[in-house]
Amino acid sequence: MRRPTARVREVSRILRDLVEPIAANVYFAPEARDAYAELGLAGFGPAYFCSRGGCLGQVAGEVITAAFGVFSPRMVIPAVAEGWSKTDAPTILAARQRGATASLTRVLGPEPDGLERATELLRVAADAATGEGRHLFSGLRSLGWPGDPMGDLWRAADLVREHRGDSHICAWVSHGVDPIQANLLTELWWRMPFRSYVRTRGWTNEEIDGAVNRLRGAGIVDGDAFTPAGEELRASIEEATDIQEGLLVDALADDAEELFGIIGPWAKEIVRAGGYPADPTTFTRP
């Protein structure tokens, strides 16, 4: 596998870190939760899977399972069926957009400095990206633009976020990693407690134990830590993800630093206000 250039690696990972709180604030916004509750979708499951997956259309849970990549089908499929029994894709997408923009406006104000320019640059990056193998990115692209300043910022950030997310799925699938193993390897990569985050994705203890045993048998994990081969594997997956973001990095060119200067303080303010659970820049790996 060819390696990403130092520039692609650095810029793509900073872009990931700074876009994450802006785009993913919607998953923690009380405004979004309230909008879903009005549709009869209180709590995590149906609201999350249908609101995020609705950009694909009103598709079956099996399709959303595949697009999201790391969740157990047993968790996703019944949640999606329940969600579509209570609402439809256009309605929940509208609720998602209202919740996201209301939350960002509450935290950042209606017109934070640099809003128009940041949106312009994020759109440049998103417009340069391609859709092959990237289901959520392509679904979002099909929705067009909300047409208001904060809505357009959020859509642009979400496009960039989901492009890397889709690219990451392509990367770990191409490395022969299964969904449970992908969760476990990411826990170790981000220095999370082993076997913790994976449990939020609906996998049973028996399934997790089986995945751990397969990683140990392959020499990827020793005990509850990476072996050198495991560290190399996970680094290779991240680099394969970086490579796929090269078009976005090239499109930003010398404007990347300007973009980071605008959205960096926003990302930290969103975290400070409780709109995202942790500062993702603290997890950046070399």
Image (spheres, grey):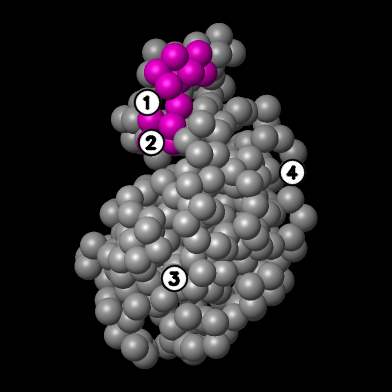
Identify residue type, mark 1.
Arg
Q: Residues within 10 Å of mark 2 (few under 14, many from 20)?
A: few
The secondary structure that dominates the magenta segment is: helix
In terms of sequence position, does the residue under pointer 1 or pointer 3 come before the other? 3
Is the residue marked by circle 3 packed among few (<14), some (14-19), or many (20+) residues within 10 Å? many
Q: In the rendered image, which residue does mark 1 sit on? A: 195
Determine crowd level at label 1: few under 14, some 14-19, many 20+ residues with C-alpha closer than 10 A.
Answer: some
Is disc 3 in contact with disc 2, using a CB cutoff of under 8 Å?
no
Q: Nearer the viewer, residue 216 or 139?
A: 139
Q: Answer whether residue 204 is magenta in the image.
A: yes
Whether label 4 touches label 1, CB < 8 Å: no
Q: Assign the N terminus to one quadrant of the image.
A: top right
> In the shown orientation, is residue 55 left or right of residue 49?
right
Q: Quadrant of residue 62?
A: top right
Q: Choose mark 4 or mark 1, whichever is in front.
A: 1
First reached walking from the N terminus: tag 1 or tag 2: 1
Give, as a three-letter code, the residue at label 4: Arg
Q: Which residues are magenta?
A: 199-211
Q: Residue 200, labelled with which disc? A: 2
| Residue 43 shown left or right of residue 121 in the figure | left
Residue 68 spot, x, y in % from top left: 57, 46
- Local packing at callout 4 (Cα closer than 10 Å; few below 14, some 14-19, many 20+) is few
Q: Residue at x 35, y 66 (%)?
A: 38
Q: Whole-Å distance between the Cαs marked 3 and 2?
A: 24 Å
Residue 286 rendering spot, x and y as whole percentages:
47, 45
* Residue name at image x 69 percent, y 54 percent: 134
